[in-house]
Image: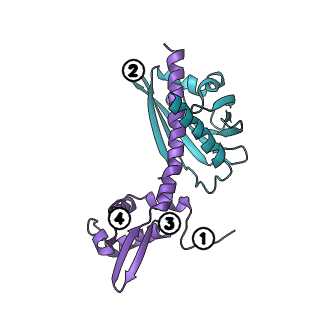
Amino acid sequence: MTSSAPADHSLDAVFHALADPTRRALVKRLAEGPAMVTELAEPFEMTLAAVSKHLRVLESANLVQREVNGRIHRCTLIGGPMREADRWLQDYSAFWAGTLDRFSDYVKKEQP
Amino acid sequence: MNEIEITKVVPAAPDAVFRFWTEPEHVKQWWGPPGVTCTEAQVDLQVGGKYRIANLLPDGGTIWIHGEFELVEPPRKLKYTWALGLDRLPAETVTVTFTKVAFGTEVRVLHTKIPDPSMAEGHRDGWVGCLEGLAEFAARE
């Protein structure tokens, strides 16, 4: 049994972090480039504290890095974990897409 | 987020499509992506009933997919748990819905609770192996 580390590198943490629409929107915005927490909060009808809480979830999944310089908090997206999660899901998609294609061919053959 | 959804329209009525999807003699003939051969299929089609499907991979190895039915509503819906490898508990979920459309049936597969690849260690090679088979097949077509 291991206690959970502050920065969880597992993809479960990535999946969990991305399961929320606000956090997905934050990731989408950060994909365009680094941003201040205040900038990130702007489009949302929520407090800075609430946005900060979402960012902490993204940080703990190792998706976002936050640099603190005095009162300025700057966030940067870390692409690696997300790419790995995406590739893993693509493997599943490819499996099912191939399976359904074969199923469709079989149905055509059985039921002309 | 750790879920995928795939749909495909097949040219037959839901009744027939449901049978093709669930009856072992049919499953053996179509199951798996290109490159994978289904050598055995056992299906106890009732809530609480189990199924297992042998997947012969292009590298010669066999991986069993197995699980238990949670919902059996012919010819519209199926829900079952899923695991890759008999040594693993089926923790993933697959929901298949069959919807009548103009030229047949839309088959929708929703695969949820997809595990972390680090936890699927050991099976990933086989999985990737069968996908390489898929890529080879696609390249030949």
Q: Which one is in front in this view, the residue at disc 1 or the one at disc 4?
A: 4
Q: Is residue B70 visible?
A: no
Instruction: Please tell me if label 3 and label 2 are on a single chain.
Output: no
- Disc 2, disc 1: CB below 8 Å? no
**What's the chain of the residue with tag 3?**
A
Furthest toward the top, the residue is A112
Q: Residue at x 50, y 61 (%)?
A: A81
Q: State the separation of the CA atoms marked 4 and 2.
A: 43 Å
Q: Is residue A26 above or below residue B84?
A: below
Q: State the separation of the CA atoms marked 4 and 3.
A: 15 Å
Q: Residue at x 51, y 22 (%)?
A: A105
Query: Which residue in the protein does label 4 denote?
Result: A30
How many other residues sit within 10 Å of disc 2, few (<14), some (14-19) or many (≥20)? few
Query: Which residue in the protein does label 1 denote?
Result: A4
Furthest toward the bottom, the residue is A70
* Amino acid type, callout 2: Phe
Q: Which one is in front in this view, the residue at disc 4 or the one at disc 2?
A: 4
Q: State the separation of the CA atoms marked 3 and 2.
A: 45 Å
Q: Which one is in front in this view, the residue at disc 3 or the one at disc 2?
A: 3
Q: State the separation of the CA atoms marked 1 and 3.
A: 12 Å
- Residue B103 is marked as 2
Where residue B95 sits in the image (x, y, percent)?
A: 52, 39
Instruction: Please tell me if label 4 and label 3 are on a single chain.
Output: yes
Q: Residue at x 39, y 69 (%)?
A: A76
Q: State the separation of the CA atoms marked 1 and 4.
A: 26 Å
**What's the chain of the residue with tag 2?**
B
* Amino acid type, callout 4: Leu
Query: Which residue in the protein does label 3 denote?
Result: A61
Q: Which chain is cyan?
A: B
